[in-house]
């Protein structure tokens, strides 16, 4: 069963700012190769990091909303971990559009 996910990718395009569109297109095709159906791609431009944890101090943020099988997330993680143009990646499972949020439990006293 396919679940709905959101991926936040930080791209390392240092010195290659004009190729960001091609990088995003390539990443979209890699998502589709793993069986993901992309709903939305949001390019959030270049942003400075709050603190520099490595050689980069800024990156291009890209947000993707897609439907995929749970096991394809692990494949995407390992594939993008080896990709020098993907600096950071984060995946989060979203609720289905018709799914109600979980009810909060009352605190036990």
Image: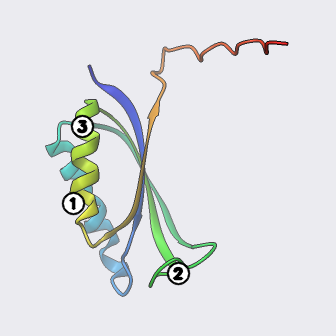
The part of the image, by quadrant, that contains residue 79 is bottom left
Q: CB of mark 2 within 8 Å of CB of mark 1? A: no
In which quadrant of the rendered view does residue 36 lie? top left
Question: 10 Å neighbourhood of mark 1: few (<14), some, or many (≥20)?
Answer: few
Depth order, front residue of 78/35: 78
Element class at badge 3: loop
Alpha carbon distance from label 3 to label 2: 31 Å
- The residue nearer to you, when weighing 9 against 39, is 9
Residue closest to the eye, 108 or 32: 108
Asked if marks 3 and 2 touch (Cβ < 8 Å), the reply is no
Q: Which mark is in front, 2 or 1?
A: 2
Query: In the image, is residue 63 above or below residue 86?
Result: above
Q: Point out which mark residue 36 bears.
A: 3
Task: Quickly name the residue at label 2.
Answer: 57
Q: CA distance from mark 1 to mark 3?
A: 14 Å
Going from the N terminus, do you reach mark 1 or mark 3 first? 1
| Chain-order first, disc 3 or disc 2 | 3
Q: Which residue is mark 1?
A: 26
Residue 37 location in percent, x, y? 26, 35
Residue at (56% x, 13% y) in the render = 100
6 over 96 or under it: above or below: below
């Amino acid at each position: 069963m396919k679940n709905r996910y959101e991926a936040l990718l930080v791209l390392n395009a240092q010195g290659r700012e004009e190729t960001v569109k091609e990088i995003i297109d390539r990443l979209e095709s890699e998502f589709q190769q793993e069986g993901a159906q992309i709903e939305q791609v949001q390019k959030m431009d270049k942003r400075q990091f709050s603190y520099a944890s490595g050689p980069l101090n800024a990156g291009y943020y890209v947000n993707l909303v897609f439907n995929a099988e749970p096991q394809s997330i692990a494949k995407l993680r390992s594939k993008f971990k080896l990709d020098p143009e993907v600096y950071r990646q984060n995946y989060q499972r979203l609720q289905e559009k018709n799914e109600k949020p979980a009810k909060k439990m009352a605190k036990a006293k």
